[in-house]
Image (cartoon, helix red, strand yellow):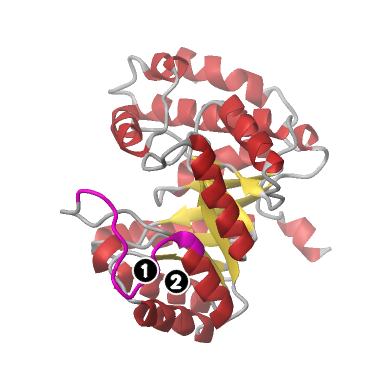
Amino acid sequence: MDAPAARFLRPLLAADPVGDFDGRPPRVSFEFFPPKTPEMEERLWQAVRRLEPLSPRFVSVTYGAGGSTRERTHATLRRIRAETALEPAAHLTCVAASRSEIEAVAESYWQAGIRHIVALRGDPPEGWARYRPTPGGYAYAADLVAGLKRLAPFEISVAAYPETHPEALSAEEDLDNLRRKIDAGARRAITQYFFETDLYLRFRDRAAAKGIAVPIVPGILPVTNFAEVRKFSALCGASIPHWMAQHFEGLDRDPETRRLVAASIAAEQCRRLHAHGVHEFHFYTLNRADLILAICHLLGVRAPRAADARV
């Protein structure tokens, strides 16, 4: 192991991963995105198969605006349901679809045995300056949640923003919107990714003060391409701490060390959150299994051993 990698991993490797989590590993869930090419499809299914033995609580599949990936999302979800032991969760948005179209999709999911939906407002399609409700559609995520609950007893997760949604008028208004989604029937909130533990903790306290009692699951993004994450974060309102830039400095041409650093940063983030009572994490996988497997291993989330399986 080279010097930069060893510096970051030594504290984690020296710790007892299971003991740090009170004798039991945390609960995890994973997010995938639908493939656009045969090569990407092969990588997705390699990731699904490699992560399946970790027994995540559920796996979600993203959903493109304006039909850009919708059919691929449907196909991916149905294949996960039919060919794996994983519990699939379907992303569903309000964008560019009528209520009847959205309800038809939801009904098809229910008939296929998919009982969990991640209900989102959705991002504006390409060419839109900003989001606008579709005539005859669900205007916002809270409306979508209410409509889905009228349709069938889905388990529904929604999005939360520790650093405030970039289109919200204020942090308080954004939190009120989360409360509306919960009141409409959502059972869980999954956060936008963040990198500073205090951002999540302050948000959780503010949500509790609003009477929001459902689990708020931290969304964890392992970073391997720092330049891309910095660019995307500028669009979605997630801040990049100075210390993270320092950790990735000089690693542009060293992908192996970048992956080790990314795994150690994400695992340490989970440990810090656990120290404040968090015991469930949602990983944005980017359809890459190796990094997620490494992080979960450090946290004590592992496939059952053959001897354990026989017990």
The C terminus, quarter of image: bottom right
Q: What's the residue at 40%, 58% (across, down)?
A: 121
Q: Which mark is residue 201?
A: none
Q: Position of residue 289 (x, y in %)?
A: 46, 49
Q: What's the residue at 33%, 14% (across, down)?
A: 250
In the structure shown, which secondary structural element does the residue marked by tag 2 occupy? helix
Q: Which residue is mark 1?
A: 73
In the rendered image, the residue lying farthest to the left is 127
Image quadrant assignment for residue 126? bottom left
Q: Position of residue 10 (x, y in %)?
A: 61, 19
Q: Are marks 2 and 1 in contact (CB under 8 Å)?
A: yes
Q: What's the residue at 59%, 65% (across, down)?
A: 184
Q: Which residue is mark 2?
A: 77
In the structure shown, which secondary structural element does the residue marked by tag 1 occupy? helix
Q: Looking at the picture, does residue 97 appear above or below residue 177?
A: below
Q: Residues within 10 Å of mark 1 (few under 14, many from 20)?
A: many
The amino acid type of the residue labelled 2 equals Leu
Q: Looking at the picture, does residue 94 appear above or below residue 79?
A: above
Image quadrant assignment for residue 75? bottom left
Q: Is residue 268 visible?
A: yes
In the rendered image, the residue lying farthest to the bottom is 111
The residue range painted magenta reads 129-142
Q: Is residue 89 visible?
A: no
Taking the image as shown, residue 4 lies to the left or right of residue 282, namely left
